[in-house]
Image (tube, rainbow, N blue to C red):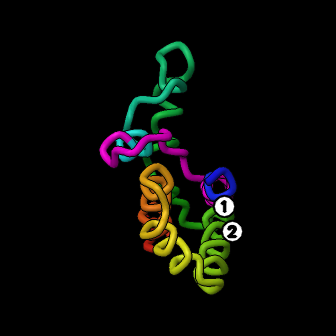
Amino acid sequence: MFLQKAMLDFFYTLLRLSLPDWTDEFSVALQATDPSRVQDAWKLQEGYVACEGKSLLPHVSKYRPNLVLNHTALLVYCLVESKLVQTLVEVIVTSDTFISVRATILLGRSDDRINGV
């Protein structure tokens, strides 16, 4: 179980996704990964408007692509081609509840990355 948790944490870090809380309840894990929830960097004295805008609004440059998004798309493509989705489904079905919740959130969030959300 420790190795599975470490690998899931690695994939969250690799895909630049926020880690959900270590829980067996989906609602708690989904609330922890909600990009619109209030974050510590959004405090008024710490650049509230700029940090909130950078977190919530997409990159809209007309003249150059966002290289971070291109890099992430390439990573997601490589992971999909190496059958990460099938592996995550197997982990969801066969593992304990805590690992299953974290793998399910990763599968849903990586789908968001594929669709550009």
Residue 57 is left or right of residue 78, and the answer is: left
Q: Is residue 42 above or below residue 33?
A: above
The residue lying toward the viewer, choosing from 14 and 27, is 27
The spot of residue 96 in percent (x, y) is 46, 56
Q: In this view, does 99 lie above or below 32?
A: below
* Mark 1 → mark 2, Cα distance in angstroms: 5 Å
- Name the residue that disc number 2 marks: 71
How many C-alpha atoms fall within 10 Å of the one at disc 2: few (<14), some, or many (≥20)?
few
Q: What residue type is labelled 1?
A: Val
**Which residue is pictured at 56% across the width and 19% down the height?**
46
Residues at marks 1 and 2 touching, judged by CB atoms closer than 8 Å: yes
The residue lying toward the viewer, choosing from 96 and 68, is 96
How many C-alpha atoms fall within 10 Å of the one at disc 1: few (<14), some, or many (≥20)?
few
Q: What residue type is labelled 2?
A: His
Q: Quadrant of the N terminus?
A: bottom right
Label 2: which secondary element: helix
Label 1: which secondary element: helix
**Which residue is pictured at 43% across the width and 41% down the height?**
23
The residue lying toward the viewer, choosing from 39 and 47, is 39
Please give the count of numbered marks on the rendered protein: 2
Q: In which quarter of the image is the C terminus?
A: bottom left
Residue placed furthest toward the left: 27
Residue placed furthest toward the top: 45
The spot of residue 67 in percent (x, y) is 68, 65
Q: Is residue 19 above or below residue 70?
A: above
Range covered by the magenta-colored residues: 6-28
The residue lying toward the viewer, choosing from 54 and 16, is 16
- Name the residue that disc number 1 marks: 68
Determine which of the numbered discs, if any, sits on residue 2 in the image.
Answer: none
**Which residue is pictured at 59% across the width and 83% down the height?**
83
Does the magenta run of residues contain 14?
yes
The spot of residue 59 in percent (x, y) is 52, 56
